Amino acid sequence: MGSKLIILLVIILGVLAIAQLVRVNELTAKQTGKREEEIPHRDNIFNSRMMLLFMILLYVGFIWLMIKYGFVDLGPAATAHGQDIDWLLNLNFVIIVAIFFLTNTLLFVFAWKYVKKPGAKAFYYPHNNKLEMIWTVIPAAVLAVIIILGLRTWNDITTTADDESVKIEVFSYQFGWTARYSGMDNELGRFDYKLTTPQNPYAIMTRANIDSALNRMMVGSPGQEGIEMIENKLNDPSIVLPRDERNALRQELGRKERMARHLQAMSATYNDSLDDLANNDIIVEDSLVLLKGQHYALSFRSKDVIHSAYFPHFRVQMNTVPGMTTHFKFQPLYSTDDMKEKLNNEDFEYILMCNKICGGSHYKMKMEVQVLEPEEYLNWQKAHKTYDGSDWLNFSESERAEKEAELLKKYQTIAARVEEK
Ligand SMILES: [Cu+2]
């Protein structure tokens, strides 16, 4: 703390000293009767050399920063599209760094080389079509290449996933993540934010959830007054309420009635067969577990504010936005074990983290991600229950062994596709 204060004082005093020196210079110039725009040759030479010195310091600083902070080792991109993104990013860096050195060298070396010499007259050179052409066409062509390559990759990444892709929903909230797997039908259950209750935090739409949300509005729930209770309170002549309290109650009643009407409309139009979509979904709160080689179609949803789902090793990032669903599809190429081996790091884990400052505990908003080999993945699946409480792999006793062997074979084929690449 003390040393910081001293440094600050030195800087302030230094600035003051320079200001005073400039002032002294101005005053002596006035005394000797020199005009301000007449700059001595000596000063021009000094300035031109400073230009050169500045260029060298800029380059040394740039190279040092690049070496120190420029290379964050995330290991190889762990998805198919991620390798394209890395290639594009490197191409952009090569172009940018080359142009940075070229333009800055021209700028500072010219300033030094063509310093004003006594008696020399400036050459009048107003226009050159050829030059204009060159410095318009070349950057335009380079930009066009970058943009076309970028668009092609981006379109590849963001086109709708095929039916073979496994659908998973990633639900974000302050401050955490929840994964919802689409289950054996590979179809996610519907949802509607109006169904959010403490018992249904992910607002999943089923007949039972609609009924309970509606009941919560009408009758109330612990700590929550329902419409009926509020109406009774307002209409009971024996209860005398202060004006403010009465107005507040009326407002709450209006809000709850509107919500109840929405829920009633939902209930009237709801098709009960949609329950099945939700009932075989699997909700996993602590981690996102994926099968190596499988194509995934992730959809993202947010409960409160905008978050950003960032999987650095997959080169995947997508905003999660309240009120809309965003998507990203990818195919993990390396299992967690593969990556441990590749990076020679026994502690390696994939991670999902929030990449948008979303509140006080933003920095804690992380979820572990695992990419498993076929057998491990099957075992993990076996240990999980669906939304309605049955087993994820809900096979009858007699055909269980056969069906599981079938699944394992399927997973092995999926994982093997990657190994061949
Ligand atoms: Cu967040």
Image: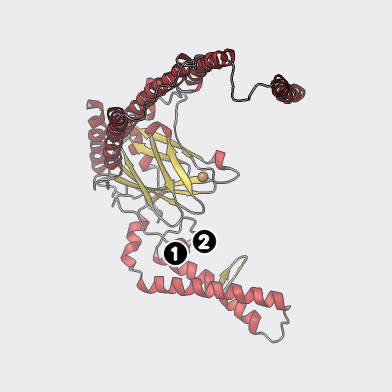
Color style of the picture: secondary structure
Closer-to-camera residue (91/414): 91
Q: Residue at x 36, y 42 (%)?
A: 382
Nearer to me, 51 or 408:
51
* 62 relative to 167, above or below: above
Q: In this view, does 227 lie to the left or right of 70?
A: right
- Name the spot of residue 232 as percent of width and height, x first: 62, 81
Report x, y in % for residue 366.
Answer: 50, 39
Mark number displayed over residue 209:
1
Name the residue nearer the viewer: 146 or 328.
146
Tell me what residue is drawn at x 35 percent, y 25 percent: 95
Element carrying mark 2: loop
In terms of sequence position, does the residue under pointer 2 or pointer 1 come before the other? 2
Give the amino acid at mark 1.
Asn
**Label 2 sits on residue:** 197
> Could you tell me the amino acid type at mark 2?
Thr
Q: How crowded is mark 1: few (under 14 residues within 10 Å), some or many (20 or more)?
A: some
Residue 419 percent across, percent down from the top left: 25, 26
Task: State whether residue 12 appears in this view.
Answer: yes
Q: What element carries label 1?
A: helix
**Which label is found at residue 333?**
none
Total residue callouts: 2
